[in-house]
């Protein structure tokens, strides 16, 4: 069933493509808790190969993937350094504290991109009063900063210096394939120095569910046990892995289209009165824009857009987010911008 609404709330909303549905129906399956699901095994091998890591683990969600990675690299009472708007800090129900017993030490950045020069000021070595730093977490692309992309040298410097200091580095790469498309570089080059990487099959890549965690064979073997503890032993998960394999092989090559649509949308939104966005900074599929100048709240605008067939949510009291994906076309983005113009001028007429 096509979605009659133009749904820009997230790239999590995509429906499986016809080839994904066929592959799901025909998937060869077994009990994955016994390691006997051939399709899951194939997906895990292929993900590890594409990322250039020894092994990978299929998990139900990105949240579980990040939770497992953080658990792998920490002990109770340690600290995890990340950017101040990270997904692990704001949107994962405090799993770093809840499951790993660690404190998040957040670093303020303009664009979501950490640099070693900033990070080094937040390191703690332990002692009578301070909890020691165990690891650094970086988010690439950075969701709430508007899909910003880490330069590879920034990642490498963080990894090199962190490793010298005995710290681990994990990437929340929910959208790392978008980062790769924006940089025009293979994902394996971006993630080469990281200890672990999580990426989502169910975001921009368009699978109905699932994420991967990759790292050393030893880390992934331990991660498998944490997945079971968290309730992620999924048995005949090959039906999901089959869609994941198509997402992994086929979708990365078309992500540039989503990025061009996001830039277009940002340019159109930027022309509207009361909306602030620097369209030049939109390089992947996420558009975060400030609507405070319209005189209306994100919640109000969201409700009015919905009445006119466009779904788009606020992310805080001033900003809204639009995310492009394969279920929205350029024409949909044109329409969404027109509807936003109507809604914003309606607000302006009222004030
Ligand atoms: N992000 C979702 C919401 O939770 C905000 C979205 O709509 O963008 N890391 C990053 C960077 C993410 O954006 C997300 C999901 C996750 C992790 C968690 O993935 P899931 O939802 O599969 O647990």
Image (tube, rainbow, N blue to C red):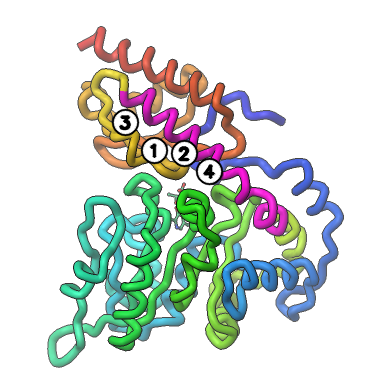
Label 2 near ligand 1 (CB < 8 Å):
yes
Q: Give the residue at x 51% y 21%.
A: 309
Q: Are marks 2 and 4 in contact (CB under 8 Å)?
A: yes
Residue 64, image x and y in percent? 51, 66
Residue 97 visible to the viewer: no
- Asked whether 253 falls inside the magenta stretch, the response is yes
Residue 204, image x and y in percent? 55, 48
Say if 281 sits above or below 132 in the image.
above
Q: Give the residue at x 82% y 48%.
A: 22
Badge number at residue 298: 3
Residue 32, image x and y in percent? 73, 74
Q: Is 93 situated left or right of 126 in this image?
A: right
Label 4 near ligand 1 (CB < 8 Å):
yes
Mark-to-mark CA distance, 4 and 3: 19 Å
Q: Are marks 1 and 2 in contact (CB under 8 Å)?
A: yes
Q: Is 126 situated left or right of 182 in this image?
A: left
Question: Farthest residue toward the bottom?
Answer: 128
Q: Earlier in the sequence, mark 4 or mark 1?
A: 4
Q: Which residues are magenta?
A: 244-270
Badge number at residue 323: 2
**Residue highlighted by disc 1:** 287
Q: Main secondary structure of the magenta part?
A: helix
The quadrant of the rendering that contains the N terminus is top right
Front one among 309 and 254: 254
Q: Earlier in the sequence, mark 3 or mark 1?
A: 1
Circle 4 SS class: helix
Circle 2 SS class: strand
């Amino acid at each position: 069933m096509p979605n009659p609404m133009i749904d820009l709330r997230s790239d999590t909303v995509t429906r499986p493509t016809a080839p994904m549905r066929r592959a799901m129906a025909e998937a060869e399956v077994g009990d994955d808790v016994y390691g006997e699901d051939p399709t899951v095994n194939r997906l895990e091998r292929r993900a590890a190969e594409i990322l250039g890591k020894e092994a990978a683990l299929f998990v139900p969600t990105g949240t579980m993937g990040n939770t497992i990675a953080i658990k792998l690299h920490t002990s109770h009472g340690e600290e995890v350094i990340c950017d101040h708007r990270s997904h692990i800090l704001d949107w994962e129900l405090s799993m770093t504290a809840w499951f790993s017993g660690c404190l998040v030490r957040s670093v303020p950045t303009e664009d979501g991109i950490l640099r070693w020069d900033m990070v080094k000021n937040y390191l703690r070595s332990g002692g009578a009063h301070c909890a020691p730093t165990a690891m650094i977490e970086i988010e690439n692309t950075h969701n709430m900063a508007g899909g910003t992309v880490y330069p590879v040298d920034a990642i490498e410097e963080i990894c090199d210096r962190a490793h010298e200091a005995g710290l681990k580095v994990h990437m929340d790469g929910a959208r790392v394939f978008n980062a790769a498309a924006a940089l025009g570089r293979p994902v394996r080059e971006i993630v080469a120095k990281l200890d672990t990487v999580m990426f989502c099959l169910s975001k921009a890549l368009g699978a109905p569910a699932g994420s991967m965690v990759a790292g050393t064979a030893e880390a992934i073997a331990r991660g498998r046990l944490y997945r079971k503890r968290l309730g992620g032993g999924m048995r005949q998960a090959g039906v999901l892995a089959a869609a994941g394999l198509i997402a992994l092989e086929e979708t990365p090559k078309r992500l540039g289209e989503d990025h061009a649509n996001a830039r277009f949308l940002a340019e159109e939104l930027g022309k509207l009165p009361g909306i602030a966005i620097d369209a030049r900074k939109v390089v992947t599929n996420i558009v975060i824009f400030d609507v405070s100048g319209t005189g209306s709240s994100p919640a109000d605008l969201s409700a009015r857009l919905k009445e006119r067939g466009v779904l788009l949510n606020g992310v805080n009291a001033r900003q809204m987010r639009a995310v492009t994906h394969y279920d929205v076309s350029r024409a949909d983005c044109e329409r969404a911008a027109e509807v936003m113009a109507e809604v914003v001028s309606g607000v302006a007429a009222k004030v």
